Amino acid sequence: MQRSRGEFDFECVPETDQPFENALRKTRDGERLAVADGIELITTGTERAGIDPERKERVLEVADRRRAEMVGERVTFVANLNNNVTTACNTGCLFCNFKDSSHRFRSDAEEAHGGFTKTPADSREIVSKAAARGIYEVTSVSGLHPAFALDDEHHEMLSGYDDAAKTVNYRPPAAYDTDPGTYLEQMDAMSVRDIHLHSMTPEETYHARRGTDWSYEDVYRRLADAGLDSVPGTAAEILVDEVRDVICPGKIDTDGWLTAMEAAAAVGLDMTATIMYGHVENAAHRIKHLQRVRELQDRTGAITEFVPLSFIHPNTPLAERGIVEAGASDDEDELMIAVSRLFLDNISNIQSSWVKYGDQQGLKMLSCGANDFMGTILSEEITKRAGGEFGEYRSFAEYVEMIAAIGRTPAERSTDYRQIRDIDAENPDGPRLGPQADGTPLFDGASRNRAHADD
């Protein structure tokens, strides 16, 4: 039986005593919003069912004004590559179709799989070629392969457990057709020519310390020494455990995610934060999530951007099992961006993901409070495998054309936003902020067409 949001027996529900008009007034006066305010804004009022179109536009208007006050008229983007190391995973998250059951990767497996595992040498070759083209960021988010360990010492510790596969989710690399190497080896392999390495989510870092008494801070410090530059705040999904118990019961809980992120900040790593919404959660869960991100930023100051990720439901277990039948609506997407801008008063940059929203709706988000338009990607496997339709490649020329068309200033940025370069809309070029970036376009029309033909 299909169930829609609101039909689960959640303790956290979108009910408040705060009037919508008062919440909107607080945004205009620049007051810090409470959870009740956020719920009223993201629902356009809890005293009535559905989203009110006129109220929605008022929320979007004030969010767009706040965006202009905080970051101006630039729309930024980054020259980046996704290099995910492996799809092998057995965590069992119901929202994910990126993974392939890890037992299928074993040398003695009889079942086939459509996934991949890359060696450190594979990763170095991929990143080196991208760096030579001017890419200066590599984002790497991978499945929790049972043979993945932090280093050789970690392998030795894990292999000492009785029935290690069950107790600590470990099998030795020799059990698999392809050895992913260690996390430290992969970090070193992707640290090519001063490229910025954005990797090791809290969930991956939990995997890199499983079966030990190492702290998150210890592990992140060793990863940083091996080449890690910043941490993607994915694996957050919804930071409310009653939702996590439905969609990802095998994953770290809310406190675990927050503990890992604070540890990353403590060793000097920048980080991003995300929300993955539009599945079983309700509006109150979304705002509780924003509250926890805002409090994390109050404590650390290390979050460079917030990224709302609209759930792509086709091909996922949540859809296949009849738990959800659709993702978020366009109205919900727009309000998620807008209320993120208004609620997260301590985070400057809000991203619109063209991979999730598509070009037209992604551009609309830039008038709802977002100021960043993601990156060139060059490879994107996670959303595509879940049924996403909006591609994997983006040239600088395309970015400039789209951003200029809405009257905003296109600008190339570094991962951490500390370097920003405005681009002449009349004479767009390629990336210039990376160690091998000299303005050469990432690809011409012919190479882009060939790349899409290979999808």
Image (cartoon, rainbow, N blue to C red):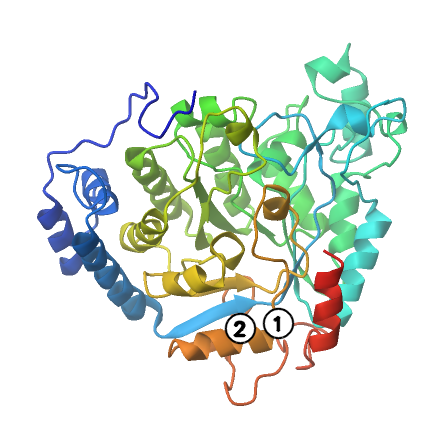
Q: Give the image quarter of residue 347.
A: bottom left
Asked if residue 7 lies left or right of residue 314, the reply is: left
Residue at figure coordinates x 50%, y 85% from the top left? 425
Q: Is residue 80 above or below residue 318?
A: below
Secondary structure under badge 1?
loop
Q: Which residue is mark 1?
A: 395
Q: Which mark is residue 399?
A: 2
Residue 19 visible in image: yes
Q: Residue furthest bottom?
A: 426
Residue at figure coordinates x 59%, y 46% from the top left? 383
Q: Residue 267 location, x and y as percent?
A: 56, 46
- Packing grade of label 1 (10 A; few <14, some 14-19, many >=20) is many
Q: CA distance from mark 2 to mark 1?
A: 6 Å
Q: Residue 113 location, x and y as percent?
A: 78, 33
Residue at figure coordinates x 44%, y 64% from the top left? 360
- Packing grade of label 2 (10 A; few <14, some 14-19, many >=20) is many
Label 2–label 1 contact, CB within 8 A: yes
